Image (tube, rainbow, N blue to C red):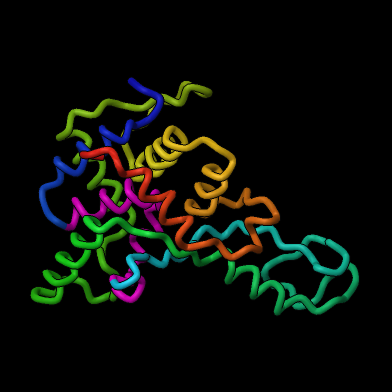
Amino acid sequence: MKAYLEIEEAVQLDDAATCLRDRLLIRILRRLGCRVSEALALTVEDIDFDRGVVTIQHLKSRIKLYCPRCGAGLGKAHAFCHKCGTGVDDVISRVQSHRRIRTLPVDSETLKMLCEYITEEKAAPRNVQGRIFGINRHRAWQIVKDCALRAGLGEIVNPETGRVRGVSPHRLRDAFAIHAMKTDDSGDGLRLLQEHLGHASFNTTAKYREMAGEEHRAWYERLWKKKGA
């Protein structure tokens, strides 16, 4: 047993996939480090093939909101601050919108696979929901689990709790994050990783500055310079 998936082991899941859809799903999870819910929510409109980017809808709902005037905690349904009475509906809307969407660079091979799969789906459509994959969360977990079994990947143990778990979509997100940290553990590397993953623990500057696209892309492409990753 091991504490996490190495990126080379995540590649083995690709090889164990039995169809293009499953291989693409695993590749997006390990190459983008997105949550499985975010991957399953992707539509064709979220892919910008010219710019080489994907728009991710941030679906995790826990967002801490505060009144801009007095700092009191707010609920997502508040129209006015319960402490000072300031109108906050517009503030809440803007903060939620900021946190829900992030744009990630995508490598050319993954874009090629996306184009191939989308073209295949158009020729023989099986998905009427408008989403790229057209499967639910349970099916996605089963795909990853089945590929892990075929690849002979063992269970993963949490080094802090000792809890033993099988390979799952979130373990691919972990593999991405660990690979990124091993590649670049500088302050800038950590900041870019936090922004890329959409973690809530952004520092104040990271929350409000518009991230430089070229800086992000250069960081992302450095992750995949090693052949076969």
Rendered image quadrant of residue 7: top left
Residue 70 in the figure: left or right of residue 226:
right
* Residue at (14, 72) in percent of width and height: 119
In the image, residue 144 lies in the stretch drawn in magenta? no
In the image, residue 34 lies in the stretch drawn in magenta? yes
Image quadrant where one finds the C terminus: top left
Taken as a whole, is the magenta stretch helix, strand or loop? helix
Front one among 116 and 41:
116
Q: Where is residue 33 in the image (x, y as percent from the top left)?
A: 39, 49
Rendered image quadrant of residue 53: bottom left
* Residue at (19, 62) in percent of width and height: 112
Front one among 71 and 217:
217
* Residue at (64, 75) in percent of width and height: 93
Say if 55 sits above or below 218 in the image. below
Q: How many marks?
A: 0
Residue 152 in the figure: left or right of residue 43:
left
Q: Where is residue 32 in the image (x, y as percent from the top left)?
A: 37, 52
What range is drawn magenta here? 21-49
* Residue at (81, 68) in percent of width and height: 68
Q: Where is residue 144 in the image (x, y as percent from the top left)?
A: 25, 44
Rendered image quadrant of residue 116: bottom left
Q: Where is residue 34 in the image (x, y as percent from the top left)?
A: 40, 53
Front one among 153 and 226:
226
Q: Residue furthest right?
A: 84
Residue 144 in the figure: left or right of residue 42:
left
Front one among 222 and 81:
222
Image quadrant where one finds the N terminus: top left
Residue 104 in the figure: left or right of residue 86:
left
